[in-house]
Image: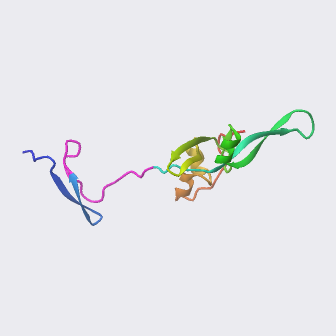
Amino acid sequence: MRTSWPAAAETAVNGVESYQHHSRHNPRPTKGPMATKLAAMPEKLYSCEVKRRRVRANGPGYEPFWKVKSVQEALVDGDTEFRCMSCHGAVKLSKRNTDAGLVAHVQHKLRTDSEYCTSGHFFSEATDGREPRISATPVH
């Protein structure tokens, strides 16, 4: 026998009463605490290293070097090559418009870099006592 829609089943989750709708995707109410996926918090690094060039001290031409800058300052200066200042891994630039204005930041391109970088979100969330390390694929 079908119940009228929306029939709600009362479920106790961590001592709090809630209502869950029956549907063809969820035919029965759940029992006990509901398992939920944690939303991945995007890491936001507001400082990074940018690749610059300077005149060689021992001869003609230029040599590349890495300089620490804020992401906002690097955008104003027109820098195009970025890397993480802690693990030297590749990062991607994110520019987002918010009510407060433009919030520019960088994020690790590779999750493994974030997992072993002291600036990374996944490193700070880890509970296994891992040691920080330089990226397996550093940007030169």
Magenta segment includes 106:
no
Question: From what the image shows, is residue 105 above or below residue 63?
Answer: below
Give the quarter of the image for residue 15.
bottom left
Image position of 98 (left or right of 83): left
Image position of 83 (left or right of 98): right
Q: Which of 97 and 10 is in front in this view?
A: 97
Percent x, y of residue 99 = 49, 50
Image position of 37 (left or right of 74): left
- The residue at the far left in this view is 1
- The residue at the far top in this view is 61
Q: Which of 70 and 38 is in front in this view?
A: 70
What is the span of residues highlighted in magenta in the rendered image? Answer: 21-39
Number of marks drawn? 0
Percent x, y of residue 69 = 70, 49
Quarter that holds the N terminus: top left
Question: From what the image shows, is residue 74 above or below residue 35?
Answer: above
Quarter that holds the C terminus: top right
Q: Nearer the viewer, residue 86 or 133?
A: 86
